[in-house]
Amino acid sequence: MSVITTIEDLRVLAEKRVPRMFYDYADSGSWTESTYRANESDFQKIKLRQRVAVNMENRSTASTMVGEKVAMPVAIAPTGLTGMQHADGEILAARAAKKFGVPFTLSTMSICSIEDVAQHAGEGFWFQLYVMKDKGFIERLIDRAKAANCGALVLTLDLQILGQRHKDLKNGLSAPPKLTLANMINIASKPRWALGMLGTPRRQFGNIVGHVTGVADMSSLSSWTASQFDPGLNWGDVEWIKKRWGGKLILKGIQDVDDAHLAVQSGADALIVSNHGGRQLDGAQSSIEALPAIVDAVGQNIEVHMDGGIRSGQDVVKARALGAKGVYIGRSMLYGLGAMGEAGVTKALEIIHKELDLTMAFCGRTQMDTVDKSILLPGTFPTGQ
């Protein structure tokens, strides 16, 4: 592909270059995938107001997220198995984010470890935490994030149990992946990917293997992880984690106003309106549809972010107009990574930034802080309750 102008271009290229089981892992939702699709399509219903004869000089997309300066109000979302989209994927994505001036969030279920990524990440290095039954492991993980100078802890609340994703089951995605004949043939057809993976020692969950008693490789990891996600997670655990961490805390997975009020009461610094990319409760509201009611209910008391369906700079503008202080890109980043490695992540950020800048200008805005609901066409966007 000679000219790449959209996130969709990167997706098409990633689909060609990444083995099917790992591409499908990123590009899928649970059950019917209705919420996964709605996350993206609901943005298209929102219309913008074009303004003319407005001075468009001296534009800036700069903003802040939880007090950190960002080149645009976009952070890279935590995504599991990022290092299986491209060799050393988390390191490459963190480098791209550092150069661009946006935060990078590392998943608990990353291939590259916290320590590996910390050597390449900038000040906007955040860590996402899943709560496991092994509380000693969680304590050590939090301490490792502190030692790596992570600027914020992103606590995911909506993965106490796993939603069913049909593609993963059909592809035999597990830890370790099932090397069926079909999978081996498919991997053999992706030489660029295969050579990259052969050239790196990072092919397992770096934050877990070697850090848990009895888990020394991918085989022993499978049985451990199957029993470790904690269905008993509750707001008392949030309080315990906040105290143990002691720094900026962001709660990910809020979709309901009642839960948003509880997030405020927890003392967290921010919440992320998120349905886990449509990978958990299928049939839930899209994130952009859920956003306005949560902003109206708690936006004066906590910083509100959102993720889910961000595929363009226009999506960033629309989310910002509806009250999100910042947004996160997961799949958009993964498509870039799978397509072209670090250069692909940079390209994804460049595409979103250019669309964001131009859309602001066409709507008569030159500064990020002036983007509000007034740039949207009345009657085309969801409203709070």
Image: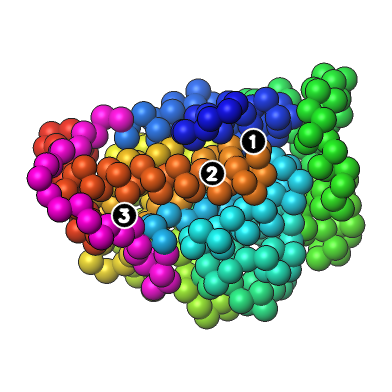
Task: Pinpoint residue 241: horizontal percent, then vertical percent.
Answer: 55, 72
Few, some or many residues within 10 Å of mark 3 (<14, 14–19, 20+): many
Find out whether residue 53 is within the magenta segment: yes
- Whether 14 is drawn above or below 287: the answer is above
Residue name at image x 34 percent, y 64 percent: 63
Q: Is residue 160 visible?
A: no
From which residue to which does the magenta span run?
A: 44-70
Cα–Cα gap, marks 3 and 1? 29 Å
The amino acid sitting under disc 1 is: Ala
Q: Secondary structure at mark 2?
A: helix
Q: State the mark number for residue 324.
A: 3
**If you read the primary sequence from the N terminus, does the residue marked by circle 2 or circle 3 appear first?**
3
Residue name at image x 74 percent, y 33 percent: 173
Q: In the image, 8: left or right of 379? A: right
Task: Pinpoint residue 147: horizontal percent, then vertical percent.
Answer: 67, 78
Q: Quadrant of residue 23?
A: top right
> Pointer 1: what residue?
339
Find out whether residue 68 is within the magenta segment: yes
